[in-house]
Structures are given as structure tokens and as C-alpha cells.
Image (cartoon, rainbow, N blue to C red):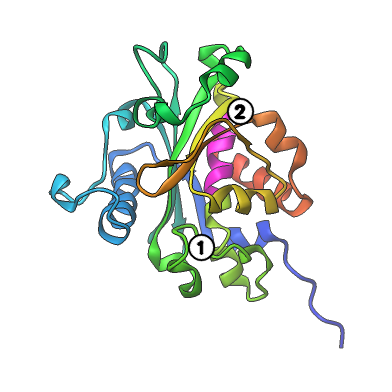
């Protein structure tokens, strides 16, 4: 008997998850709840005492664009990410990484990129709820196991792809909003995970201890889209269809 055809990652992911914009107050609360559980309760990057309502928020949220991944069967929020647009000069209206991690940036290199500020953004607050991470990966990273894209059980496979799906959702927004010059502060694990997907960030500064060791990275939307592995191109297209339409 022939084996059943293997489902693509996009087919598998769409069977278990919904990806969309978080636009209503209720949807944004789900985003802030994930962030509270991950950043405050689990990894203790922020004090739980700062957020009595159990919603992790900051000043950038009011003009950021938020994406939310929801588990279809349970309705549980599974992952989130935001796009923070640059709204002015970095001296007056800095992006989060410019405000909190400015000493780590290679400003000479960044200046030589000659980026128009209205094309710049930062992808930040990418988080996957602990309920949707493989147990073997939880002690290592809040994004899951680095070999996650290779698991055979379909639902485990999709669980471990949530971080990549979050990044794709934010990338869709960079494309839609014309914010195609993208910065991010990332833990060492995440660039390695993205490299496995064909996405190569350019390091634009040195390590800094800010909620753990992180470093600044840069990528263009075009570079993301040109180098995606074929199965991930299909996943990206599905996410784009859900967010843009």
C-alpha cells in the first residue's frame, strides 16, 4: 500500500492555527497576555509587579502593528509579534533597539546604509506561549527547538514552526506598509533558526546583556522573500493571504 502523501508545512499549519492581525482590544489583550506569560512569569525579563493586569505593554504598542497566532482547536493564543515603525529621527523618536540597546549598534555601518527613515521598522516582542513549545526546547529558548522544522508528527512540527510563522506575519506587514528595511534585537538562537529557513540576517552591532545576551540585526524584506526555502514560500503565501485579505 502506498503511503499517504506528506502534507506541506502550510497545509499542516493551517490545519491547526490561524494567523491574523490583532486589531481589536480583545485580540491585543491576547497578545499582551502571551508576552506577560513569557517575558514576566516564565523568563522574568520584566517584573510581574509592573503589570498588575497581567498584560505586558509598553509605549510602542499604541502605534505598532500586532500579529497573533491562535490554536484553532482550543482557541488559545499561541504566538505573537509586532512591527514598530520608525516615526521620526532616531535622536527624537528612537526605535526600541535604539533607545534601550543603542550602545550595541554599529552606527557608522547603519548610517552607510543610507536608509530613508520612513522605510525603517523594528520587529520585536516575538513570543511563543510555553504551552506550544516542545518540552525539550523550553530550557534552551523561548522559541522552541532548533530542529523543529524536521519533526515528523504533524502537530509537533507545526508547534515548532510558530516562531517562524510569527516572523513571516511581521514580514508581510513590512511588505504591505513599505517598511522594508528591518531591524531586530535577537538572542543568538533566533538568527540560527532563521538561517535554517533560508533567511540570513546581517549583524549590525555587538552583543549586549539586555534581557539576556542579544545582538542587533538587519535584513531587507526583499532578501527574506528571495531566499525562502520552497516549503516556507508556501507558508509565507498562506500567511500573507490571511493578513492582507
In the rendered image, which quarter is residue 161 located in? bottom right
Q: Is residue 113 visible?
A: yes
Q: Splitting the image into 4 quarters, where does residue 25 fall? A: top left
Secondary structure type for disc 2: helix
Task: Identify the residue at image location x=45%, y=23%.
Answer: 85
Q: Residue furthest bottom?
A: 1
> Measuring 68% from the left and 43% from the top, which residue is drawn there?
199
Which image quadrant: the C terminus? top right
**Residue furthest toward the right?**
1
Which residues, given as a range, are shown in magenta? Answer: 165-174
Q: Which is more N-terminal, label 2 or label 1?
A: 1
Query: For mark 1, does the 10 Å Cα neighbourhood hold few (<14), some (14 to 19), or many (20 or more) residues?
Result: many
Is residue 245 something that shows in the picture? no
Is 242 in the magenta? no
Q: Is residue 3 left or right of residue 86?
A: right
Q: Which residue is mark 2?
A: 175
Task: Compute the Cα span from label 1 to label 2.
Answer: 26 Å
* Image position, residue 13 (x, y; %): 60, 60
Amino acid at each position: 500500500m502506498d503511503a499517504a502523501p506528506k502534507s506541506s508545512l502550510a497545509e499542516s499549519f493551517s490545519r491547526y492555527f490561524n494567523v491574523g492581525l490583532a486589531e481589536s482590544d480583545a485580540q491585543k489583550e491576547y497578545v499582551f497576555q502571551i508576552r506577560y506569560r513569557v517575558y514576566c512569569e516564565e523568563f522574568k525579563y520584566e517584573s510581574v509587579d509592573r503589570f498588575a493586569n497581567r498584560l505586558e505593554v509598553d509605549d510602542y504598542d499604541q502605534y505598532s502593528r500586532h500579529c497573533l497566532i491562535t490554536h484553532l482547536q482550543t482557541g488559545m493564543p499561541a504566538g505573537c509579534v509586532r512591527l514598530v515603525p520608525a516615526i521620526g529621527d532616531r535622536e527624537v523618536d528612537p526605535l526600541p533597539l535604539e533607545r534601550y540597546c543603542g550602545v550595541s549598534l554599529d552606527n557608522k555601518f547603519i548610517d552607510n546604509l543610507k536608509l530613508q527613515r520612513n522605510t525603517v521598522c523594528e520587529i520585536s516582542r516575538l513570543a511563543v506561549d510555553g504551552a506550544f513549545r516542545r518540552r525539550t526546547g523550553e530550557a534552551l529558548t523561548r522559541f522552541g527547538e532548533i530542529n523543529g522544522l524536521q519533526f515528523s508528527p504533524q502537530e509537533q512540527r507545526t508547534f515548532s514552526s510558530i516562531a517562524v510563522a510569527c516572523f513571516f506575519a511581521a514580514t508581510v506587514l513590512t511588505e504591505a506598509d513599505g517598511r522594508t528595511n528591518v531591524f531586530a534585537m535577537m538572542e543568538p538562537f533566533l538568527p540560527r533558526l532563521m538561517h535554517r529557513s533560508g533567511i540570513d540576517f546581517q549583524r549590525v552591532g555587538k552583543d549586549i546583556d539586555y534581557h539576556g545576551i542579544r545582538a542587533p540585526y538587519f535584513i531587507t524584506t526583499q532578501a527574506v522573500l528571495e531566499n525562502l526555502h520552497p516549503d516556507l514560500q508556501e507558508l509565507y503565501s498562506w500567511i500573507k493571504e490571511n493578513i492582507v485579505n
